Image (cartoon, rainbow, N blue to C red):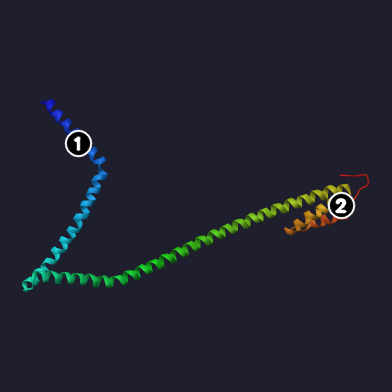
Amino acid sequence: MEKEKLNYKLIDIVLTLLIIFLVINTFGFWSGVLNKIFSIIIPLIISFAIAYALYPFVQKLVKKNVPKGLAVFIVVILVVGFIILITSLLIPIVIDQLISLFNWLMEFVLNYWLEVLFTTVTGLLLYMFKQYIGVKSGIKALLSNEIVRLYELYLDLGYCPSYIKENVEEIYKNYHKLGGDGMITSMVNKLYELPNTGGDKYV
């Protein structure tokens, strides 16, 4: 007896698992079937609910010796007219609300994106300006160092070849364009004053 009970329990478990397995594997099929059934039943339920709600009005008209068909027609016309009236009253309000919502969204989006765009562009320009200032300062320092190096070298030699003077002149022009001046200008002038040759001395 105990073995038979165990066998029945095992069969029940196997059948339950088999049913669960089949339901899972055919879920797409059954969901499609249920959707079709609901798509047919829901309109019927709505129609029944409307008919049930309007039936007392039809009964009242029938009690007043109005033919049942005419009573149904009158009630349907009244309901349709009521729906049209409500719709005609609500549609302009809904349209106005939608237009207001659209305008608000457009204003919000424009203001937000304009602010974001302005902030981004301003930050980018500021970054580029800082980079430009940094590069400019670096180039000016390099040119200044080169002029100082040449000045110290040829000042010790006591002369400065003409091609070096031309080179210094080009360096100084670029240095001056970057806003450089001051002591570098006096160094360049002193280099120009040095003789082009130094006798037996050479670079």
Give the amino acid type for the residue marked by disc 2 in the picture.
Answer: Ser
Eye-nearest disc, 1 or 2: 1
Q: At 23% across and 41% down in the image, what residue appears? A: 23
Circles 1 and 2 in contact, beta carbons < 8 Å? no
The residue that label 1 is drawn on is 16
Give the amino acid type for the residue marked by disc 1 in the picture.
Answer: Thr
Q: Which mark is residue 27?
A: none
Q: CA distance from mark 1 to mark 2?
A: 106 Å
Q: At 83% across and 49% down in the image, what residue appears? A: 152
Left or right of 167, for residue 97: left
Question: In which quadrant is the N terminus drawn?
Answer: top left
Check the image and report above or below for 17 versus 81.
Answer: above
Image quadrant in which you'd find residue 4: top left
Check the image and report above or below for 79 versus 34.
Answer: below
Check the image and report above or below for 79 versus 194.
Answer: below
Left or right of 41, for residue 201: right
Between residue 139 and residue 105, name the one nearer to us.
105
The residue that label 2 is drawn on is 162
Image location (x, y in percent) of residue 39: 22, 54
Image quadrant in which you'd find residue 121: bottom right
Dot 1 alpha-carbon crowd within 10 angstroms: few under 14, some 14 to 19, many 20 or more: few
Q: At 76% across and 50% down in the image, what residue appears? A: 145
Q: At 39% across and 66% down in the image, what residue appears? A: 102
User: Which of the marked residues, 1 or 2, is nearer the chain's N terminus?
Assistant: 1
Left or right of 90, for residue 164: right
Question: In which quadrant is the C terminus drawn?
Answer: top right
